[in-house]
Amino acid sequence: MLNRTADSVARATPEPLARKVRGISDKGLAWLFISPTILLLLAINIFPLFWAIYLSFTNYRANRPNEIVKNVGLANYRRILGDQDIWIAMQTTAHFVFWTILLQTLIGFTLAWLIDRKFRGHAFWTTIILVPMMLSPAVVGNFWRFLYEPQIGLFAYAVSFVTGIPATEIGMLSNVSLAPWSIVIVDTWMWTPYVMLICLAGLRSIPEYIYEAAEVDRASNWRQFWSITLPMALPFIMLAVLFRGIENFKMFDMVNLLTGGGPGSTTEVASITLKRQAFESWRTGYSSAFAIILFVAVFGLANIYVKALNKVKQR
Amino acid sequence: MSLTSAHSVVAPSATSKRVAGTIIVLYALISIVPLLWIFATSFKTPPDSIAYPPKILFQPSLEGYCNLFTTRTRQTPEYINSLGPATGFCDETTRKRNMVIAGPSNFMPRFVNSLIIAFGSTFCAVFLGTLSAYGFSRFKVPLADDLLFFILSTRMMPPIAVAIPIYLMYRELGLSDTALGMILLYTAVNVSLAVWLLKGFIDEIPREYEEAAMIDGYTRLQAFWRTVLPQATTGIAATAIFCLIFAWNEYAFAALLTSGTAQTAPPFIPTIIGEGGQDWPAVAAGTTIFLVPILVFTILLRKQLLRGITFGAVRK
């Protein structure tokens, strides 16, 4: 009898009220905990973003702060979309993103597939392979300039040792047709382990009984690979491609130090163009407009891609 | 069925293991060569570093490290002979090249800047991140998914695009080229990673612990402090290391927003120049010192690496 009364009283007391009695309410605490982060992001990310949007409609130049700022409407955007150099930069970026992702996915997946054989010492060698991706792309990219030097550089020496081409003729950074590949090579070297690690997680997530069932059905290894391994690892591969795609679309540090966009503008990816316009030519309004276009492009492409990824996951 | 698949039908055969092992070891060895080369070059003399063919065997020397920490000026042999005896190894090596040490280089201050900015921003990001992650994990926050996505999306912007308005804002606020400005900026960039990672870690701690603590008379805040935080230590440590690595390696913001007093090591190392071009042994020495902490952290983090690089999307 007494028990039932206590029970009904407990049920009648609304939960939040019961908690409010002891210190701050849950709701208050939640906002107290979350708001500092939101405020910081508003101040350092969102406010500048809106400022950049405003600037993109003006002819403002950061090196002439006293000049009267004129509203130019959509002129900056119109000029960018008609600018030959911008389109060349976008092509260079596309070349870089396409080849790095293709190579990293192929090599990364193959490595993961081999590591999944679980040979003796595989954990140790996996850790060794992972090292390059943790290092600073800027500092290591800078050192690759030395490796790429014709004649004295180790890379040129190794290539000439294998192919027989004189080492003095392998100017990875000075040759117009080789330079775009020089940045692809360094990026692939650095980030293949990243794709590998994610693919490895994908391969390890496939339950063994599926293979056992396939074995009972006498499916060939080839068949097992195409009908089990690849489809089941696909969401992971796509996730790796998403992360690498976003990162490489905004690539700046490694390329800036390795080639600086040169020779000429053969390796001038979008971020380098943006830096040249914003911090060398000081066309702040114009470059803000370009920055907004780039941001919308990354955001839009990533959104479409995530939708595709979710579809694959649901299958 | 062959004999090799006696115990398990799906275990890879011994031959396939051996082939896989060989290819992986070869790849690992080739991919590590550039790093070994950085290490080796840091112990070469300048003439050895630019020898053709590249020298694999050489007499190790600390000249690169001497050059990294000092600035030198060229002097006539008469002047050098008129000086007293050399005061140390670096002094002696420098004099052999007809130069004298003029003073310390900027490497130490830049390295210290890197330490201050990396640790400062990591502390702030992890502090804010832990609070928010707990908030998102335990309370019904309105529009939680949208807020979390907003937090993540701030990381998708190209750094140069962010740097243009930040540059103007910091110029107005007097934060240009200050450690405080860089700490604020890196905190903002890292907090998105911290929230996403830590939310994953805190989600894994059963709510029953706190509920039990609260029944025992703890307030929510005490329960958070006494039961959740100790449980989340591993997650917090792993998150902190990821934030630290980002801030330590960051180049784009540092190169555009700092030029002197607050400059970090990544934009400084490429500017180390000797006579007649880049002083590669000194650059390699700086690079080596800069990379060693990251190597140690990578080994410590091995198990959490996957989670960190995918923003907690993939957990093992």
Image: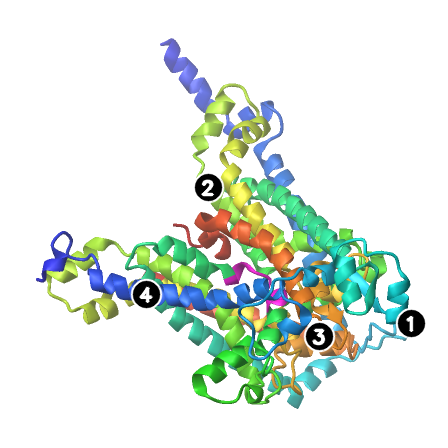
User: In 3D space, how far apart are the residues under numbered discs 1 and 2 (Cα atoms)?
Assistant: 52 Å
Q: Which residue is mark 1?
A: A66
* Amino acid type at image mark 4: Thr
Q: Residue at x 65, y 90 (%)?
A: A84
Q: Is the residue marked by circle 4 packed among few (<14), some (14-19), or many (20+) residues within 10 Å?
A: some
Q: Quadrant of residue B23?
A: bottom left
* Amino acid type at image mark 1: Asn
For the residues bearing labels 3 and 4, Cβ distance under 8 angstroms? no
- Secondary element at tag 4: helix
Circles 2 and 3 on the same chain: no
Up-down: is A119 above or below A248? above
Left or right: where B309 falls relative to A269: left
Q: Chain of mark 2?
A: B
Quadrant where the N terminus of chain B sits is bottom left
Q: Nearer the viewer, residue A194 or A22?
A: A194
Residue A94's x, y, as percent?
53, 80
Q: Nearer the viewer, residue B85 or B208?
A: B85
Q: Which residue is mark 3?
A: A275
Q: Nearer the viewer, mark 4 or mark 2?
A: 4
User: In 3D space, how far apart are the residues under numbered discs 4 and 2 (Cα atoms)?
Assistant: 40 Å
- Secondary element at tag 2: helix
Q: Which residue is mark 2?
A: B203
User: In 3D space, how far apart are the residues under numbered discs 1 and 4 (Cα atoms)?
Assistant: 65 Å
Total numbered labels: 4
Up-down: is B284 above or below B246? below
Q: Which residues are magenta?
A: A132-140
Instruction: Name the N-terminal-most of marks 4 and 2.
Output: 4
Residue A135 lies in the magenta stretch: yes
Q: Nearer the viewer, mark 3 or mark 4?
A: 4
* Amino acid type at image mark 3: Lys
